[in-house]
Image: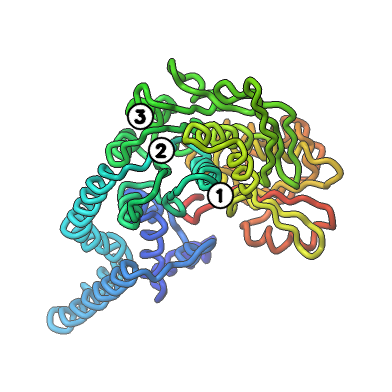
Amino acid sequence: MLKHRLANFFSQYRLDYPRSLIYILQASEYDIGEYLTWYRQTQDFRRVERRKRLVYTPKAVCLLVLCWLLAVMLLGGTMMFSITRGWYVLPIVLLLLPVILAYGILIPLVLAKFLIQKPAEFFVIRNARTRLASHKAVKVSIAGSFGKTTMREILKTVVAEGKKVAAPPHSYNTPLGISRFIQTLNGNEEVLIFELGEHYPGDIKKLCDLVRPDIGVITGVNEAHLEKFKTLERTTATIFELADYLGEKRMYVNGESERARGALRRGHITYDRTQVGQWQIHHPHTGLDGTAFTMIKDDTKMELHSSLLGLHQIGPLAAAADIALSLGLSPEQVKSGIANTKPFDHRLEPKTDTSGVVTLDDSYNGNPDGVKAVIEFLTSLEGHRRWYVTPGLVEMGPKTEQVHREIGRRLAEAEIEHVILVRNSVTPFIAEGLKSAHYAGKVMWFDDALAAFAALPHLTVRGDVVLLQNDWPDQYR
């Protein structure tokens, strides 16, 4: 035990300690509060960079150089003082050096933020707001605790069959990210689709003031980011700031989300796997080859097929179809657009290796509704041995234990043959949920996800289906 504690203590004096500090900052998206929380709970700085590594962006390089300069100046000044005044100061400085570096590096970061970054962002966002206000495109905005990127990509793919459409790439869902995207527009786009990110109350309202949407979609409300919002009521109110902004304009709400359904207002259009607006959905089917369903309204019938996996995708696909029709696309164009939709990176993305094992990469799905949907999909697969690999979910706040016990219970009820858990603060709750539901399959534990991934080729056989559920960022225990 003493040897272990000494190793942890001296890990702060390794040459890569400054790099670890900058990595913590970068992985925390330079949020000082998150950085300090992570720093204070870190005991062994040798194990900070586990899942990912520091990306040497200009900002990261500048901070790393400043951190080293601070260390050299501090040690150099202490040495000069010690030569003339006495050596008693040196051990004190050496003892405090790691802490001084950890907090000292925040000074240039704060100065740069308020003297350079904030003013620059203000002008970028102001110019983007002015430019977008004069843009004649129909603007669609998407908000929700989950499924925003999937909804954005589905809608973009379908609408592109008949309109010039553009949307920010990746997860550009902040005022600055959206503003940078707006600067790339050429002005002839007919439809613009925006994903609105939320972390704190008021975030959606600010983004609506920037984007000024004409049509809105709320994909659902759940415990994602509950650690920041504290209560589901605050989460719901923040996401429905989109509905507040739109007023009487066209607003779609996911009827399969209990929280979102509970906040419905008159005039809102609900969508789920049975209907969207006046369209009725029939003959739903899903499997590893995709999802098919039929939409019927009056005398119009559309038989649709998508490569997306899971019945939970029918609602978003149907909503995209209805929006596209409202924008002037024909049923034939909608059918073609739905056919072009395919699994997105790390969102229930199927990959079959040379040994015949199917891996469903769902590592970007970190919310309870998404977990429920993929377990439901695994349940529907027949003739396959199924593996569920997870480190659990993050930012569940006070609902952490409840959410993870429920995951365990669902896995047991679905009779998933193998469950692989990555050791951390939440997976014991999944194990307890499995036990309480009398799980009859096999549970395997690994110390980290990389070890689990390395072991899977030796554990699986042809025909197995492996679900990789969520990623676990380094800053979470």
Q: Amino acid at mark 2?
A: Ser
Give the vertical position of 183 relative to 416 (above or below): below
Distance from disc 2 to disc 1, alpha carbons, whole Å, reads 21 Å
Give the vertical position of 355 relative to 410 (above or below): below
Q: Amino acid at mark 1?
A: Tyr
Residue 29 visible in this rendered orientation of the protein: yes
Q: Which residue is mark 3?
A: 241
Residue 32 visible in this rendered orientation of the protein: no
| Frontmost residue, 357 versus 415 | 357
| Frontmost residue, 318 versus 147 | 318
User: Do the CB atoms of the residues marked 1 and 3 lie less than 8 Å apart?
Assistant: no
* Snapshot quadrant of residue 282: top right
Q: Which residue is mark 2?
A: 141
Q: Which residue is mark 1?
A: 364
Identify the mark nearer the N-term, 2 or 1. 2
| Frontmost residue, 214 versus 414 | 214
**What numbered label is drawn on residue 98?**
none
Which residue is at 20% across, 51% downward?
A: 122
User: Do the CB atoms of the residues marked 2 and 3 lie less than 8 Å apart?
Assistant: no
Question: Where is residue 370 drawn, in percent x and y?
Answer: 60, 38
